[in-house]
Amino acid sequence: MNLKKISVLGSILVTGFISESSFACSSCGSSATAPLVLNPNENLKMYLGISQNFGYMNYGGYGASATTRTANKMLTSRKTLTLAVGYRTSENSFVTLTGSVIQNEGPADSMNYANGTKTKYLLGDPILSGRYNLVNMGMDNIYRPQIQLMAGYKPGLAKNMVDRDGGAVDTVGNGFHQTNGGIDFWWGMPMIQFGASQLITYSFNRTPGNDFGGGINQVKRTRDLQYTTVLTVGHAFTDYKFSVQAGMILDYIGEETIYLENSAGNQTSKTISPAQSNSAFFLAKFNVTDLDTLRFTYTIGGAYDGNLGPYTNSNQTTSNSALVAYERTFF
């Protein structure tokens, strides 16, 4: 047996002794990037999730200061059915494809909330993403983190307000084609697990060319970079095939600029201020069998209303959410 074969066999043996509960990532539980992540011993995996968003709140808007919280009456609830499939492309890399069907519920008349409610069914933006394991955990050093590189692309195909497809109940997407990249660190082998990830999202400029109202044409729309930070702690109850995680999601969305043109050809622009939100999430994961996993996640949007300096909630709409998900590994 040559040295290369011995090295590969040694790697397989070391990985085999690592608890299944050790495998995760900082951004896995939060779904901040993609809901499905493959462990090193998984090659084809499916994810089915059902979630509900509720308790919508606005920070800023309607004459309030950027950090003042008020109830959002434009959207009552959002139910989402998410399906994702992941496939391993090499020993250290995999790709996932995610799609969703959404049910929005809110007032039938945004000018008069007494006129009842309406429900809309929409398709969410598909997401193609991938990860590459730059560094793997190992029994030789339990404090060596798993380090993953992340990348993804989301086309802006869903109904959205940039394309003037309607109000909050009638839309679901942000209207931008987006690509992202980042890095994820996960210390999964110590008794107290810890993770941190950073994702940067770039939005491609849009040229909607649609009526913005009052005879004004929306000729262009841009958005600056978005930064998403996830901090996670957790613990695995190995004997019970059960693990828990909790963490924070800090999300900054850059300034958005709308370029307008009137019938005479005169151009003006207006800006939408940068937005910041902080959320807390709690996750419980149970390995029903070696191939089947149940996940329960609860997220509190706008978790802390106090002054967090640059991380204070501002110019953003937040909501709480509850998620139940089932994962199946085929091989």
Image (spheres, helix red, strand yellow):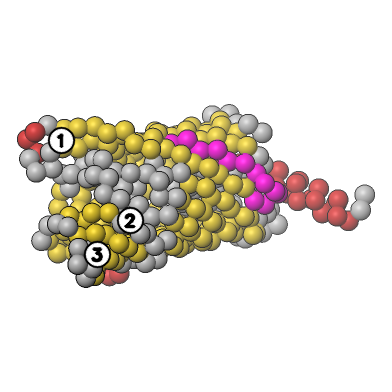
- Label 1, label 2: how far apart the Cα atoms are: 26 Å
What is the secondary structure assignment of the residue under circle 3? strand
* Amino acid type at image mark 3: Leu
Q: Is residue 260 above or below residue 129?
A: below
* Amino acid type at image mark 2: Pro
Name the side, left or right, on which 281 lies relative to 152.
left
Within 10 Å of disc 3 (Cα), the crowding (few <14, some 14-19, many 20+) is many
Residue 9 image point, x, y percent: 81, 48
- The residue wearing badge 1 is 108
The residue that appears at 12% across and 31% down in the rendered structure is 116
Q: Nearer the viewer, residue 298 or 70?
A: 70
What is the secondary structure assignment of the residue under circle 1? loop
Image quarter of the C terminus = top right
- The residue wearing badge 2 is 208
The residue that appears at 40% across and 50% down in the rendered structure is 156
Which of discs 1 and 2 lies nearer the camera? The answer is 2
- Whether 99 is among the magenta residues is no
Q: Is residue 120 above or below residue 279?
A: above
- Label 3, label 2: how far apart the Cα atoms are: 11 Å
From this viewpoint, is residue 117 visible?
yes
| Lower sequence index among marks 1 and 2 | 1
Residue 248 image point, x, y percent: 38, 55
Q: Nearer the viewer, residue 264 or 278?
A: 264
The residue that appears at 26% across and 49% down in the rendered structure is 164
- Label 3, label 1: how far apart the Cα atoms are: 29 Å
What is the secondary structure assignment of the residue under circle 2? loop
**Image: magenta residue range:** 82-93
- The residue wearing badge 3 is 260
| Lower sequence index among marks 3 and 1 | 1
Q: Nearer the viewer, residue 257 or 130?
A: 257
- Are circles 3 and 2 on residues that touch, CB within 8 Å? no
